[in-house]
Image (tube, grey):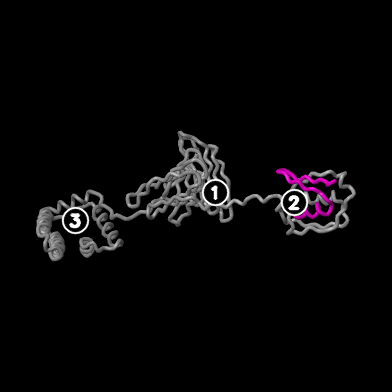
Amino acid sequence: MYLLDRYLEQTATEEELQEYADWYRKAGSAGPNLFDHAHSPAAQEYTGSLFASISTHIDAAEQRQAKGRQRVLYFRWAAAAAVIVLAGSLALYNGLRTKPAPAPFIAVKPSSPAPPANTIRIATQATEKRRIDLPDGSVAELFENSELNYEAPFGSHSRHIYLKGKGYFTVVKDGARPFTVYSEGFSTTALGTSFTITAYPGKNAVQVLLHSGKVVVKQWPHHDAAPMQDVYLLPGQQATCHSSTGLATVRLPAEVKRKRPVPPGSRTGFAAAFDQAPVTAVLDTIEKGYSVHLRYDKMEMADMVFSGRIRETDSLSQVLYRISALYNLTIQPTVKEYIIRKNH
C-alpha cells in the first residue's frame, strides 16, 4: 500500500509512478476477479486496508485545510461509498479491470517520424561530403557524419526527406507536392528554394538557414507541453529551434565583410630585377606581374634600356612613376589600361 500512500500524497517519484502503472496494468489484464467472494477473508482484509489508507489521508487533509470542512465531508462520503461498493461485490475493481489503465504523463521530446520501409538510405563518414541528385530534379548535398533517407519512388505522391546531421538542399518547384525535410522533431517545407539544415542528434536544437525562396519550419509532431509557432523565413534568415523548450529564434547570420577591389595602381607583391634590359621588355614584364594592360608605342621606346629592381612592397604606381621620370614619359591611367607616351 505504500505506492498508494505516496500517490495520494503526490510525493511519488517518476519510478514509483511507473511501478504503480505497471502493477495496475498487470492487475487489469490478469483475467479473473481479484476475489472469488466479496465476504472472503482476503476481500475483507483488502477492503479494510483500503479504507484505512483513505481515512488516514482524509485526516491529514483535515489538518492541512481546517477551513475546508465541506470538501472533507464530501471526501468522507465518497470513501464510504467506495467501501460499500467494494464490500458488495468489488464491482468497481472488476469494471476498471476491463479498461486499459491510464499511463502516467511523461514529457516526451519531439522526434522526427521514422522513415517508411520503402526508403533509400545514404550516409556519410567523418570526412566525407556527398552530392545526391534526387529523382524529381532537386539536389541535396550531405555533409560529414550525416544520414539522409527518402521515399522510393520519390516524388510520385509526395517529396519527404528524413535527415540526421547537416544537409544543403536545392529544391525544384512543384506546387502539388511540397518538399519537406524532417529533422530532429521539426519539419521544413519549401515549394522551390535552397536552404541548409543542421540537425545532429543530441544537440536539442535545429538550425535552418534560407538561401533563396521561402520556407516554413514547424514542430513535428506538435506537443502541448512545448508548442512552437510556425516560423516563416526570408532569404538570408536563420532559425534556431529548440526541441526541449519549443522556442525558436530568427536572426540574420553575421555578414561577411566584402573586400573592396584594390585599385590597379595600389597593387603590390611583384618583384623582378633588370640589367640593361630593353624598356619594352621591362614594360611587358610589369604588365604580366601586376595583371594590368599597358599601351605604348614600341618603336618610340626601342632605344631605351633599364637597369634596376622591383621589390614586393613597390606598388604599380610607384614603379611606373620612376620609369616615367627616368625617361621623360607621360602615364595616363584609364578604366581599362595605362597609356604611356614619350614627351616631345
Is residue 282 found left or right of 248 in the rendered image? Answer: right
Q: Secondary structure at mark 1?
A: strand
Which one is earlier in the sequence, the residue at label 2 or at label 3?
Answer: 3
Discs 2/1, front:
2
Which residue is under mark 3? 34
Residue appearing at x 78%, y 45% in the figure: 339
Which one is earlier in the sequence, the residue at label 2 or at label 1?
Answer: 1
Label 1 environment density (alpha carbons within 10 Å; few <14, some 14–19, many ≥20): many
Which residue is under mark 1? 142
Is residue 323 found left or right of 15 in the rendered image? Answer: right
> Which image quarter is the N terminus in?
bottom left
Q: Which residues are magenta?
A: 317-344
Relative depth, front residue between 102 and 228: 228
Q: Is residue 100 visible?
A: yes
Label 3 environment density (alpha carbons within 10 Å; few <14, some 14–19, many ≥20): some
Relative depth, front residue between 183 and 96: 183
Residue 331 forms part of the magenta stretch: yes
Relative depth, front residue between 301 and 258: 301
